[in-house]
Image: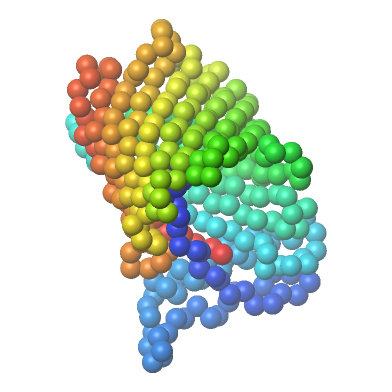
Amino acid sequence: MADNLSSVDSPYPTATVPPTTHNSISPEPTDCIHRDAEGRFLGWVDSQHCLLSNRTTMTAQWFDSLFGHWHEPNEAKIRLRVINDINWIEGEGLSAKLRFRASAVLPNARKRLRLVVSDDEDTLHPERNQLNNPQEPKTSAAIRWIPDTLSRVKYSFDIGVHSTPDIFARVRAQRSWRISDNSVMNFTETLRYGLKEETKSVSQLQIERLLNDKTVFRWGNALQYWQDEPDPVGLRWSEDWSILHRLAQQKTISYGIVVDGVQQPHWQVESDGIFILYRQSFWRHWLYYEIEPHLTRYRDQDWDVVSAIIFRLEANFGN
């Protein structure tokens, strides 16, 4: 919920790409020097952001050209998110983690292929940074095919590689039902097979209700199975209740309760806790910061309350 619903982000900046010739790579843009109305230079940061955004677009165009001739070269694009997490956990101190998430639209690849880069490891909470996640997230890159079907169920098929390293195939099915004018239920089933990690599946059921034009209530449930888990516990399950409130166009706050558990040796709760997440754009429309304090209790720590806080910086690049 935190990353998913709060990502009512500002639109990605538009990178200007000059016209290209047939089946060729466009030259590097030269219009990345930003000036105000009086002609004063706005700064190195904006110029570098513009250049990197344009280079991601050029990379998408080059990759898309491998699938054929360019008919609409400006439709090839990459959206890149660079996320730096700084975590403080009581009794463990500070730690930092740099994460990347990217999605590329490749129109010449039958207009149905995408390049997806993510640290989403098909966990119980793929949209959140889990402080108690037993598996360290790994970056993956995959080619995603979205078939053009008339079914109410949306399918996607991925073939990719993990940083472990591992080669995997993944299929995902999604279905939504409108319960009422203000309520929606979403179900997602993900099945992945890796040559090393073998079978992993995640089932997710979410109900979202619009409380008013700025507030959403979410009830989420998830069930995970991993065939080759280092410390097998059968199925892992999670349930969370959360509320997202939009304070402004680029400012949100969310808070809620999360309960996690396992199947073996018997069905039981392993941890529960509360969190608050504040997200806001600052300085530039493509820069964000998040502050996310937690209070969590763990069974293996005799249900003592452990405090933690995540400070997150995020930069968005691309078109």
Q: Is residue 59 left or right of residue 111?
A: left
Residue 164 visible at all: no
Give the farthest residue toward the bottom: 38
Q: Is residue 21 left or right of residue 119?
A: right
* Residue 278: image location, x then y, percent: 31, 50
Residue 219 lies in quadrant: top left
Q: Give the residue drawn at x 41%, y 89%.
A: 37
Q: In this picture, is 239 found above or below 251?
A: above
Q: Give the residue drawn at x 59%, y 44%.
A: 141
Q: Give the residue drawn at x 26%, y 37%.
A: 294
Taking depth in this image into account, of 262 and 311 the one nearest to the observer is 262
Residue 145 lies in quadrant: top right
Q: Give the residue drawn at x 57%, y 33%.
A: 187
* Residue 270: image location, x then y, percent: 34, 19
Residue 259 visible at all: yes
Taking depth in this image into account, of 221 and 265 the one nearest to the observer is 221
Q: In this picture, is 65 found above or below 41?
A: above
Taking depth in this image into account, of 243 and 26 the one nearest to the observer is 243
Give the farthest residue toward the top: 265
Q: How is the image coloured?
A: rainbow
* Residue 302: image location, x then y, percent: 22, 16
Quarter occupied by the C terminus: bottom right
Give the farthest residue toward the front: 181
Taking depth in this image into account, of 126 and 161 the one nearest to the observer is 126
* Residue 306: image location, x then y, percent: 21, 29
